[in-house]
Amino acid sequence: MKPVELDLMLQYRYLSGLNAYQNQLIYIDTLADTNNNDYTQRLHCLNPHTKEDRILLEDKRIRYALVDDELMILKGTGSNFIETDVYQLDQKVCTLPLEIHSLYGFTDEYYFVTANSLMDCPNYYCMDEQEKKAYHTKKEKNNDYLVLDEYPFFYNGTGFINGTRNNGYLVNKKDHSITKITPDTMDIEHVIIDGNRLYLLANDYQSMKKMWSSIYQYDIHTNQLSCIYKNESMYVRKLAMVKGKLHALASTKTCISGQSFYRVEDGKLTCVYGTEWMFYNSIGSDCRYGSCKNSLTVGGNLYILNTVEERSVLQRFDGTSLEFMTNFEGSTDDFTFIGDDLYVIAMKDMKLQEIYQVKEDVVQLTHMNDEVLKDKYVAKPEKFTCFNLHEIRGWALKPINFDPNKKYPMILDIHGGPKTAYGEVFYHEMQLWASKGYFVIFCNPHCSDGRGDEFSDYLKHYGATDYDDLMMFVDRAIEIYPQIDKERLCVTGGSYGGYMTNWIITHTDRFKAAVSQRSISNRVSDFYYSDYSYDTTYENGIPLNADAIELFWNRSPLKYVENAVTPTLFIQSTEDYRCPFPEALQLFSALKWKGVETRICGFKGENHELSRSGKPEHRLRRLEEITRWMEIHVK
């Protein structure tokens, strides 16, 4: 078998955007564009019965919406003006003076659109050309200034969001006139359409975003937007129409992991089905690109992705109970229906993404990635466990040409989140390392998703139980596989995995090399300039006084840097607003002062998604840096 090489990822096709269209399937495949150090996308139309697969469109980025059985393509104009061109496939329909996020069919007369609105110019959409030019001229004069007066002020992958909102608009289908139906200050998070009514999950705020979003109803007959649930205590994440009734997926402040189904009625949320699940696909991989849906209402039932144990599954909620629609090892990434027939984009059997029909069996329809992995050594995950309060489950990948009489270096790879999870899916980086002669081990410690509230409780486990889990898992791997050379151990991880890598190097000297990616080293500083702190204030409160600051500092790897001796490489992106660049700089500087071998490889223009959707050359360089660092220290 041939090894998996570093640049093989340039040949992978990533699938997304699966939907039913005129009794066929449409989807997007994305491929690295090596000439331009970017990606190119193709919109496909697949007949699931004949397997005929036509390419409808090819472009650098493809955004589409299905509206009234029409395929609508959305394209930014590329000018300084905030505009979106709308096409019916290849025929231009109009140019709207809006930076459109989402386009929906609403009534016979109107589309409903959510679009970016600027607080300093909320009526941009109804200004004439001269007024628009004047606005942009004024804006350009202030390009050298960054003024912040709101919180949160930036978001990873988006940039600075200070003074912006996602507003709602009606667009007339005939003359394309625009009517805003939400206040300038309202930020829409989720939309449900039911006949002539819109239901909006939104956060209406000035200066400081509220902790909890409320639910609003818009009735086109009365032209009234009204609040039907004013939220002061629940984290509402999603809305859905189930059996003709409005439901919300929400959790209480004390529920760390799970969301439950609530009926929205009479200004209250009434729990109709309790769970300890988060209802999204949290099975990680570095072999995805593009947007996939999380939920869909069909026939009055809600179909929704969920992470259960070590799998991403599709479940159906009928108003009273949950039923599995898929439950195979691997990851269900996207889904749609043609009539009663279910189709999914999935990663299964250690393959890259393909489209499958789910019947009594799961039948593969596409073969986009078969050839690229043909004759390659794809290490099969071998599952094993250890015990620490709960069963800790994980896997090992054996090195290529494994010889039981030889000794091999080992890499512990730690996932992000912490509320994501590993499963039996293809990871390019892990397969590369197995092909380079490493044992690769990975597990789901406490705080991981898919195991319920007690297992995922951050307050109890973060930076404590999870560290013990990982060290016990390493010990168990060495016990099961005596071919692992315990004198040549490496550790790496990204995001939460980067945090745990930092924690490990400041609490043990057993690893000969470490690579900390998009990490956190100081939880006090990270709280104040990370984009996710707003959503995690319930974890330890807010570090506004000495006692609270002490709680955050106690869980900061930087506090324990005097113990660090492990040669450590930091991988960080300059526009990572989830785990900002200074988090790596702080620990890097401390290691330098201590005389510990260390290095930072920073990627300009990249964000938190470097390993998954960064520019192809940057993704290659990242993995090259990591692999070289390990080879220098253990081979």
Image (cartoon, rainbow, N blue to C red):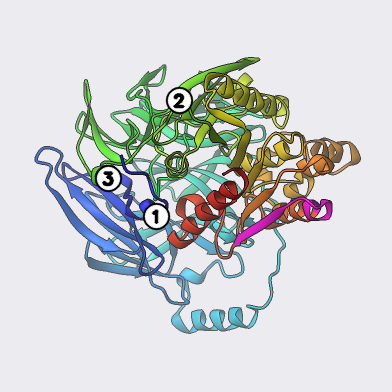
Q: Earlier in the sequence, mark 3 or mark 1?
A: 1
Q: Is residue 366 left or right of residue 132?
A: left
92 over 436 or under it: above or below? below
- Identify the residue position indicated by label 1 in the image: 7
- Identity of the residue drawn at 53% across and 62% down: 117
Q: Secondary structure at mark 3?
A: loop
Q: Earlier in the sequence, mark 2 or mark 3?
A: 3
Residue lying farthest to the front in this orientation: 405
Q: Give the magenta range.
A: 590-602
Q: Amino acid at mark 2?
A: Pro
- Identify the residue position indicated by label 3 in the image: 369
- Identity of the residue drawn at 65% across and 15% down: 389
- Magenta stretch holds residue 29: no
Q: Secondary structure at mark 1?
A: helix
How many residues crowd around disc 2 within 10 Å: few (fewer than 14), some, or many (20 or more)? few
- Identity of the residue drawn at 38% across and 72% down: 77
Q: Amino acid at mark 1?
A: Asp
How many residues crowd around disc 3 within 10 Å: few (fewer than 14), some, or many (20 or more)? some
> Mark 2–mark 3 contact, CB under 8 Å?
no
Q: Is residue 255 visible?
A: no
Q: CA distance from mark 3 to mark 1?
A: 15 Å
Q: Check the picture and name the quadrant holding the N terminus.
A: top left
- Identify the residue position indicated by label 2 in the image: 404
